[in-house]
Image: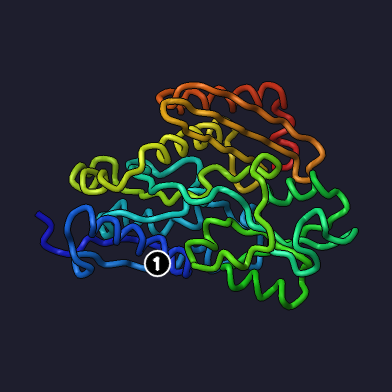
Amino acid sequence: MQMKPYRIGTRGSPLALAQAHETRDLLMKAHGLAEEDFEIVVLSTQGDRIIDRSLSEIGGKGLFTFELEEQLADGRLDFAVHSSKDMATGLPDGLGIVAALEREDVRDAFIGKAAPTLAELPDNAVVGTSSLRRQALVKRLRPDITVVGFRGQVETRLRKLSEGQADATLLAYAGLRRLGRPEIATAVIDPEDFPPAPGQGIICIETRLDDRRIRDFLEPINHAASATALACERAFLAVLDGSCRTPIAAHAKIGGAALSFHGMVLTPDGVTVHEVRLDGMAEDAVTIGHKAGEDVRARAGAGFFESWV
């Protein structure tokens, strides 16, 4: 029996804290516990502290989780709450994603200062984004547009936009909804035209794989369909050795026992695109993700992935 509060690890941004609170509240309801039965432990990560360079320059997505995973591994944290799209492809030995909350809206939000939609931006407009996927998709749809780097929390990016550093930016619509600010979006983009990052919209929970007590504690809040979709998308990512250096999109949709997958890899300039669609059974999610990744890799060739690394 747990005699001390469950220690939940999280980053300190308003969005990360909202996700940690959502997880805690679900666990309170599932187990009949009170707020004092939990302690939310806020850690500053290297990815949060270094915002003047792109992730590809400073070491990748793992910089958002290193400090959290260090304390998970030695038992200082019971579990950590993450945005799934920020998780590195490979996790440290002994740690794993053991639960996923129900997926929020998967789409990207367009926030336009010069125009309400990407299509309506004036010629040679400037879009700010830190995501290579978003950069490549923007360039695919609007080759005339210049993309500049935008890193930082939501408020930081909105401030940069208001200061005129760009004519528009893009953010995950799920994040805006979780922050209670969906009205910021001037448009929400169809995922058929602008597919999401693997795991976008899903809050995941990471813990020690051999800690059966904590895994059993988290099981009641695991949303099976979202966990299945996440497993498929991360399998696709793993085959492609996806990182912040590679523009990769993936979206698995679950309908009952069926799964429909849409994946895409692009060059950063959006000129070359390889796309895959596969349907199958949800129970085969990981296999479908692997097969889709192998299909794209075979068609693209190794040089495609090595050309910008």
In the figure, is residue 271 to the left or right of 83? right
Residue density around tag 1, few if under 14, some if 14–19, many if 20 or more, within 10 Å: some
In the rendered image, residue 153, in percent from the top left (x then y), is placed at 56, 68
Left-right relation of 183 to 101: right
Q: How many marks overall? A: 1
**Coordinates of residue 293 in the picture (x, y in percent):** 59, 28
Q: Quadrant of residue 151?
A: bottom right
Does residue 61 lie above or below 301 as drawn?
Answer: below
Q: Quadrant of the N terminus?
A: bottom left
Quadrant of the rendered structure where residue 274 is?
Answer: top right
Q: How is the image coloured?
A: rainbow
Q: Secondary structure at mark 1?
A: loop
Q: Position of residue 37 (x, y in %)?
A: 19, 65
As drawn, 260 above or below 136:
above
Q: Determine which residue is flagged by label 1.
A: 43
137 up-or-down from 16: above or below: above
On the question of residue 246 being in view, the answer is: no
- Quadrant assignment for the C terminus: top right
Q: Residue at x 82, y 39 (%)?
A: 271
Please tell me which residue lies in front, 31 or 1.
31
| Point 35% across, 64% down: residue | 21
Tell which of 229 and 267 is nearer to you. Answer: 229
What amino acid type is highlighted by mark number 1?
Answer: Leu
Residue 26 seen in this snapshot:
yes
Q: Is residue 169 left or right of residue 242?
A: right
Q: Could you say where residue 57 lies in the image, as x and y percent from the top left?
A: 65, 55
Q: Residue furthest bottom?
A: 163
Q: Is residue 165 above or below residue 251?
A: below
